[in-house]
Image (cartoon, rainbow, N blue to C red):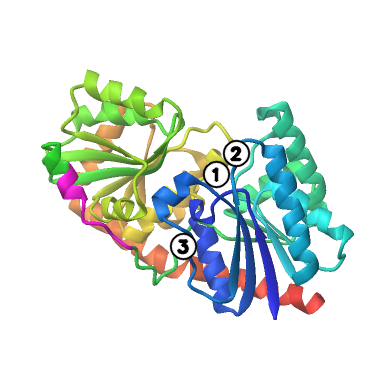
Amino acid sequence: MKKIFIILSRDPRSAQVLMFLINALLKKNYHIHLFYHRSKISNDAYGELDFKNNNIETHPFDVGSSNKLNFIVKTLEIIKKFNIIKPTHIIAVDKKTLFIVFFLNFFKKKFNKIHMILDFDYPKNESIKESLITKIQFFFSRYVDLFLFPSTKRAKKFFQLSTINDKNFTILSNHFPKNFKPEVSNKLNQILNDKNIKYSKIVCSLGTIGHNHYFPELIRSVSQWEDGVILIIGGWPTKNAKESLIKIISEKNLQKKVLILSDISEKLWCEILLKSYLGICFYKQDSISNQYMAGPSTKLSNYLLANIPFIACDNDDFRAFNLKYNLCELVNPLEPIDISNKINALINNKEKYNLLKKNSRIAFSESLNFDVQFQKLYEKLIILEQDY
């Protein structure tokens, strides 16, 4: 039996590609032990984690007040399970869990080490503590057998910073499987009716409600949008982000055109998405991850699934992406008037809108989906098993 440990310091549902990966491995008859952090926020959004599959055992760790104690308790539990189960592969999903993988070398030398890197940044941009952890990650990465990155550009940047050459990697972006069918709520119209918001079209921005997505500029642009077009911002707010945006909405008298829905369920998220006409995909260029979002972006993958065009940042990464696929429009997100002009133009140009929808559908069907990327990963796993 092929046995895999997957270790991460979060709920796997916070990164949808992890859930797709786990389910795809189960279908290939891998037996999985999943070690993860359980939190109230994730359970409120998704409910209890349940795969309904006998080939996976979950080992949740409840997040407490002491990170150091959590790490020690988690490490000891994983070591105990490791000595009993003796997995053939271990997937470390973040840099701290990569350290645990190399502790396990003291107990068994031969197992395949796989490192899944979702986000990272320049050590110089991090705190002293995080910078040290990143540098240790770079060191241990020299002994990894296979890397999983959300984009080729992020992979190249990681290898450049870590001075690692010729490492084995494959791409596993945040894209959905082709046959994915989301569960959808039936609450949005009632929410809008309760707030007396009337609309003809919805523009949405779903995900983290934070300070690095140009939300102030986006909200200010709404004043110049076509009549009947509303903006829905849905997701999970960072500290003070929602309050500052509500203040702008009030100042601009946009209560009937902008709605912020925080801490929403996955079903309501999907309902908003599938009822939207356009999406927004803005990221400040303040980190490596945000500089390379054309592919890894959860927003982008959602818009592909729903087959709706979107407006993205006019930066090098999205320019190259759109030159290849032509399924979105680009704009300078610092200028509210530019945002409103771009949105109004696309709403009024049905021919252009339909072309972007067509290209989005083709891209999702042929390449920008989980199935295509997992097949390449699976082929690499087979090679690793032959060497095991």
Decide: marks 1, 2 in contact (CB < 8 A)?
Answer: yes
Q: Is residue 184 magenta?
A: yes
Reading the image, the residue beneath label 1 is 292
Q: Residue furthest top?
A: 251
Tell me the kind of residue under disc 3.
Leu
Give residue 363's position: percent from left, percent from top: 41, 63
Q: Is residue 72 magenta?
A: no
Reading the image, the residue beneath label 3 is 368
Compared to residue 19, the image places residue 71 above or below, namely: above
The residue depicted at 10 percent of the width and 37 percent of the height is 196
Compared to residue 205, the image places residue 246 above or below, namely: above
Q: Which quadrant is home to the N terminus?
A: bottom right
- Give SS at disc 1: loop
Q: Tag 3: Cα neighbours inside 10 Å, few (<14), some, or many (≥20)? A: many
The residue depicted at 15 percent of the width and 32 percent of the height is 256
The residue segment tinted magenta is 183-191
Q: Which quadrant is home to the C terminus?
A: bottom right
Tell me the kind of residue under disc 1.
Tyr
In the displayed structure image, the side of residue 276 where residue 374 appears, left or right: right
Tell me the kind of residue under disc 2.
Ile
Residue 44 visible to the viewer: yes
Compared to residue 213, the image places residue 172 above or below, namely: below
Sequence-first tag of 1 and 3 = 1
In the displayed structure image, the side of residue 101 where residue 368 appears, left or right: left
> Could you give the CA–CA distance between mark 1 and mark 3, rounded to whole angstroms?
16 Å
Reading the image, the residue beneath label 2 is 288
Sequence-first tag of 2 and 3 = 2
In the displayed structure image, the side of residue 264 where residue 298 appears, left or right: right
Nearest the camera: 46 or 310? 46
The residue depicted at 40 percent of the width and 50 percent of the height is 45
The residue depicted at 59 percent of the width and 76 percent of the height is 55
